[in-house]
Image (spheres, coloured by chain):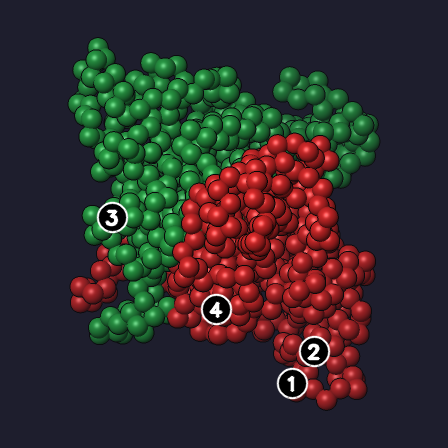
Chain colours: A green, B red
Amino acid sequence: MNIDKIMKEKEHLLNKKIEINGWVRNHRPQKEFGFIDLSDGTNFKHLQVVYDKSVSDFDLVSNIHNGSSIKVMGILQKSEGKNQDIELKAMNIQILGDCSSDYPLQAKRHSMEFLRSIAYLRPRANLFQAVFKIRSLASMAIHEYFQKRGYIYLHAPLITASDCEGAGEMFQVTTLDLEKEKTIDYQKDFFGKKTGLTVSGQLQAETFAMAFSKVYTFGPTFRAENSNTKVHASEFWMIEPEIAFCDIDELMNIEEDFLKNIIQYVLEHGQEELQFLDKFTSPGLIEKLNNLLQSQFTKITHEEVITLLKKAPVKWEFTPSYGKDIAKEHEKYLTEYFKGPVFITNWPKDIKAFYMKLNDDGKTVAAVDLIVPEAGELMGGSQREEDYDKLLKRMQQLNMNIKELQWYLNLRKYGSVIHSGFGMGFERLLMYLTGIDNIRDVIAYPRTPGNCEF
Amino acid sequence: MNIDKIMKEKEHLLNKKIEINGWVRNHRPQKEFGFIDLSDGTNFKHLQVVYDKSVSDFDLVSNIHNGSSIKVMGILQKSEGKNQDIELKAMNIQILGDCSSDYPLQAKRHSMEFLRSIAYLRPRANLFQAVFKIRSLASMAIHEYFQKRGYIYLHAPLITASDCEGAGEMFQVTTLDLEKEKTIDYQKDFFGKKTGLTVSGQLQAETFAMAFSKVYTFGPTFRAENSNTKVHASEFWMIEPEIAFCDIDELMNIEEDFLKNIIQYVLEHGQEELQFLDKFTSPGLIEKLNNLLQSQFTKITHEEVITLLKKAPVKWEFTPSYGKDIAKEHEKYLTEYFKGPVFITNWPKDIKAFYMKLNDDGKTVAAVDLIVPEAGELMGGSQREEDYDKLLKRMQQLNMNIKELQWYLNLRKYGSVIHSGFGMGFERLLMYLTGIDNIRDVIAYPRTPGNCEF
């Protein structure tokens, strides 16, 4: 028996004898009786256990510490309490594992910083029960979405010799004995060359899209960027679908449909968790998510955006410019102006990646960023350059290593087709879904500059 | 429209006008007409396209190269051919992307070695269409299995400062400029200490099992082992469930149920793919999988196994020994002897990991390996040591870094419970499901010593 089963079948189980294991989240002993909030993590709700002097070994029971694991045998009964409609009237309570008095996770409010320092215990706290359950639910929602629609799940490689984005912020992977080696010879390294951790699985996803039409990756990616912000982690998960015979307009439809489906799934399967977050940490969360489901997604070009921002009756910190990226303050203005998510298309080519399709104007590329209310940029995608000569020319302009990426170029030589894809940082989505404002709190064991604990 | 939709709704679509995009897998032009095997990867089956002189631009069409991408407009009709019951009678065929004559993937038999050298094209070959579809299906089966049963999906960290198995075969991760640094100072490294790529997410999974009761990981793991065998890869995916309040007996039931469910799912959803593999590369594959579904799983101790092997009328290459691991030849004998999968339990503690529960005999641990016919070891699991003092003693005996793993030990101090888990290499499962005998051929872009291409 577990608490999830009890919550789902409570009518049927009422007045029945039940045996259950779990952890004591909060114990309130009184002189003649006591209450225990029991959790086993299978349901967000705790089960209230009540006991009185009729329980075997009352003295031992009334001294049970918070955090201990116990086995309870009792009768499920209706509860008079205002916080629950059922409770377990204990006949017998057995301590499975005591909890030492130095237990750091006492039943009180802790700071997020402190909870990060005990990341191995924080999943026991309500807030993280909610966050990591939603993380699990959202993962499943993503797999279901793509698999139901015939996408193939690709595990893109993580150790790689090529730097997809050309950003140069890669972790290096080696088996050389650095303390002993006098000179570094990559021919002697494990793979016989210099290798690092991937920043994107997109290029490999494109190879699979040319075979299966619809594919997606969902795996870890890495960024060795020395930024200590609330939204950057060195290790995070990305979702990167890639679709053949799909142009940028169709891509935007897919992005919208995808996002709405994920939100719908989490609203349906994570009700308790969202209600908790809405109540205690992120007021308005559920309304925000429901609003997004009802939203019209605006489509607008980067040029139109800049014109709009320039006209806006706002004193910008960052002056909008036709050749440049837009700032957080601009994103905020735009989602408020359009009262919903905004697709910004046709970006200046010089601020976007080499593989994006050059538009007929020769100046912009068929890139699209999706910005959403309160969270800013959530997805970045593009139609890919499917013309061999144009792609080669762009790579030459950027002084890229053509030889290293000849296989990627070849996709444009062997049955090239129009194709598009987008990338979404999974943790960005989770921050949006939970209202949690620090990426460190939606990752079980976050890795950031200077931090690699547990 | 895509081929999957056509195959599934062919009755309804018969005699209707259809437009479809895809790649030419095989083109057989005749003088007055021609046949094209069209694939778009959405269904294992190809769509036969027939055209005659009535098609617009017959001369151009009859010169279409294998590998090209085309758009076909035509009428779906019944086919007289013996290989298909429907075909598309083309009215118009448009070349989207030509395929250069140096296309390496011509319609003939290629060696597996050659196909590995063009790994970016091989997903277009039938064999790899089957393999990577099954990889995708099996991934989904695994997620569905756990999520339906209330397990939480944990993304365990990949960059880590601790070596779970103590095997010492870790890739190092660094941002130090190795060519410039004179002396290596890990305090100046990205995380301020020496870090590497994880070999297992189990220890972190245990922390989550103490909060959610049932969790699973499904993510990449790494082994910097210099072995060039058919079954070793440097980067592979692992599934590691961890279950609280679960002993080794219950664990074996879960393993059996899990494996049978995954196989059932793939048999149901990957029929075409399995039939192809059964016919062309792995005769008897489907029978093997069906047999496993019907199998009784035997449970036997390591000691009993050794006794049995010693008595067996076989001249062993490796002599069975009570204190040692068993060899491939032993595994084969056992699965044949018991006519099915075998759980081997209670292994000598000295050949198993530190975290396994010490049995009362003080000599063996509550470990269990599952071996299956034809494939050998598929899963390895154990009940974990839940006693703080016993675990500490074992770690001290093995000269482990206690300080580094104090958090792991603490799980035994703060509400410790009996718990168990197992690990399964995803690629081992795929080799079993597909009959493919080289791990390099079930991974999109395999990484092995000296090989890190694409």
Please tell me whether mark 1 sits on a helix, a strand or a loop. Answer: loop
Please tell me whether mark 3 sits on a helix, a strand or a loop. Answer: helix
**Distance in Å between CA atoms under marks 1 and 3:** 61 Å
Residue B100 occupies quadrant = bottom left
Instruction: Please tell me how crowded label 3 is: few (under 14), some (14-19), or many (20+) other residues with Cα within 10 Å.
Output: few
Do the residues under discs 1 and 2 have CB atoms within 8 angstroms?
A: yes
Do the residues under discs 1 and 3 have CB atoms within 8 angstroms?
A: no
Q: Chain of mark 1?
A: B
The mark lying in front, picked from 4 and 1, is: 4
| Marks 4 and 2 share the same chain | yes
Please tell me whether mark 2 sits on a helix, a strand or a loop. Answer: helix
**Numbered circle sitting on residue A393:** 3
**Distance in Å between CA atoms under marks 4 and 1:** 35 Å
User: Left or right: B356 with respect to A123?
Assistant: right
**Distance in Å between CA atoms under marks 4 and 2:** 34 Å
Determine which residue is flagged by label 2: B330
Q: Position of residue A419 (x, y in %)?
A: 43, 40
Q: Position of residue B89 (x, y in %)?
A: 62, 41
**Numbered circle sitting on residue B318:** 1
Point 26% across, 72% down: residue: A185
Q: Look at label 4 and name its amino acid.
A: Phe
Nearer-the-camera pick, A400 or A90: A400
Determine which residue is flagged by label 4: B114
Do the residues under discs 4 and 1 have CB atoms within 8 angstroms?
A: no
Nearer-the-camera pick, A54 or B191: B191
Q: Which comes before the other along the chain, label 4 or label 2?
A: 4
